Image: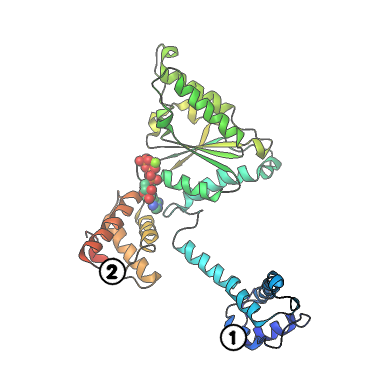
């Protein structure tokens, strides 16, 4: 809804307060003047808030409860904010990269994650109406530091309040006590089922599902563990209702170490590779960090220009983690030199 100019706001306020009891001291011209950015809906909210303020004061202000005073509007003005400003702040936040749905430099991968995992989990009936069941699991793989854990955490934030997210570092499940690791895995899956719909994120999954050894595998502890994991995964998803749905998202740096059985359809069937970021992606990641720092880049164009330069400088092979590190080092260098803002010369270019 568009915001109004001062005259429009005064006109709208006169119509809205026409049937309200307002004291002679209420100055609609002043309220109109100080409510820049308010839309008609915001002004309506302001009037409602003024009524609430008045009714809250009723006990201490006997006899005048029904009559709105100027101070009621003044108080309401401190509580109601123009929705346009809220949207603009949200846009600014998104631009700074805080949007939960975006992983800088990896928009395609983030989209794939969202559409493969989140949408079927949250709207199972849509897929069901097409006659297919959602995937049970997804594997994110790529070199260390490219942001596999980072993207999963962002996924977790975007499903807050809609689905539960269980973040599991697989090495923490390993135990030297015979049978304890399998029990940990079983407990974990039971917990996920009890809080479904849920996404279970298995980070560093290679330590739970390494390639099976040939020979007498029945005696091998890791093989028993893998079998346990496969059994749990096979029993994991109830496709018919969202209540029972659990989707497994696993991450590894070493896809070749995983037993092919866990990568089969029905298990971790969707594979998403996160490669080292190319120049354009590196620029985006630099932009993400620079926009959160105090830099000498005055506006978004200057930040983009600096990001582009730094993306070239840091070169192929650098990961998101390296970029974050470079930004941190630059900030440390600025701090040591007593500079108030970070600029190009603080990077070790
Ligand atoms: N695309 C990115 N955008 C912004 N920050 C990133 C990105 N990728 C990595 N980072 C930063 O680097 C840190 C390390 O990344 P992360 O732990 O996700 O890497 P990883 O791929 O899981 O590595 P590993 O295989 O070693 O676990 C993140 O916490 C984040 O701060
Ligand atoms: Mg990780």
Q: Secondary structure at mark 1?
A: helix
The quadrant in which residue 243 appears is top right
Drawn side of residue 25 relative to residue 287, left or right: right
Percent position of residue 231, x then y = 55, 23
Q: Is residue 168 above or below residue 297?
A: above
Residue 207 seen: yes
Residue at x 66%, y 42% (from the top left corner): 124
- The single residue placed furthest to the right in the displayed view is 19
Q: Quadrant of residue 246?
A: top right
**CB within 8 Å, label 2 to label 1:** no
For the image, the number of numbered tags is 2
- Mark 2, secondary structure of its residue: loop
Residue 150, relative to residue 245: is it above or below? below
Q: Residue at x 29, y 65 (%)?
A: 342
Which quadrant is the N terminus positioned in? bottom right
| Numbered mark located on residue 211 in the image | none
x, y percent for residue 169: 43, 35
Look at 25% across and 68% down and name the residue there: 339
Circle 1 packing at 10 Å, graded few (<14), some (14-19), many (20+), is few
Residue drawn at point x = 21 percent, y = 62 percent: 336
Residue 275 visible? The answer is no
Q: Quadrant of ligand 2?
A: top left
Residue 340: numbered disc: 2
Crowding at label 2, few (<14), some or many (≥20) Cα neighbours within 10 Å? few
**Side of 267 relative to 345 (left or right):** right
Residues 56 and 122: in front is 56
* Residue 3 screen position, x and y as percent: 61, 78
- Mark 2 or 1, nearer chain start: 1
Q: Is 157 on the left or on the right of 50, as rendered?
A: left
- Residue occupied by mark 1: 33
């Amino acid at each position: 809804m568009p915001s109004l100019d001062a005259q429009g706001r005064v006109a709208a306020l006169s119509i809205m307060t026409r049937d309200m009891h307002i004291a002679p001291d209420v100055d609609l011209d002043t309220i109109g003047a100080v409510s820049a950015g308010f839309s008609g809906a915001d002004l309506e909210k302001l009037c409602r808030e003024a009524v609430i303020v008045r009714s809250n004061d009723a006990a201490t202000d006997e006899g005048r409860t029904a009559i709105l005073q100027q101070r009621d509007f003044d108080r309401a003005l401190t509580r109601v904010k123009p929705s346009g400003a809220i949207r603009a702040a949200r846009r600014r936040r998104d631009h700074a990269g805080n949007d939960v749905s975006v992983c800088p430099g990896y928009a395609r991968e983030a989209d794939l994650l969202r559409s493969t995992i989140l949408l079927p989990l949250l709207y199972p009936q849509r897929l069901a109406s097409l006659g297919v069941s959602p995937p049970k699991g997804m594997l994110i793989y790529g070199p260390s530091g490219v942001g596999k854990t980072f993207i999963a955490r962002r996924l977790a934030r975007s499903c807050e309040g809609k689905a539960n997210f269980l973040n599991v570092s697989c090495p923490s499940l390993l135990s030297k006590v015979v049978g304890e690791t399998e029990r940990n895995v079983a407990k974990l899956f039971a917990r996920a089922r009890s809080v479904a719909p849920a996404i279970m994120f298995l980070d560093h999954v290679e330590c739970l599902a390494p390639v099976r050894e040939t020979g007498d595998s029945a005696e091998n502890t890791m093989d028993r563990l893998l079998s346990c994991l496969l059994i749990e995964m096979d029993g994991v998803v109830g496709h018919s209702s969202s209540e029972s749905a659990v989707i497994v998202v696993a991450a590894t740096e070493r896809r070749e170490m995983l037993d092919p059985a866990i990568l089969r359809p029905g298990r971790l069937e969707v594979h998403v590779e996160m490669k080292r970021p190319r120049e354009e992606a590196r620029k985006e990641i630099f932009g993400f960090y620079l926009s959160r720092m105090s830099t000498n880049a005055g506006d978004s164009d200057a930040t983009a220009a600096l990001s582009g330069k730094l993306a070239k400088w840091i070169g192929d092979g650098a990961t998101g983690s390296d970029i974050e590190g470079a930004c941190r080092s630059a900030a440390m260098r600025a701090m040591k030199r007593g500079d108030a803002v970070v600029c190009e010369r603080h990077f070790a270019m």
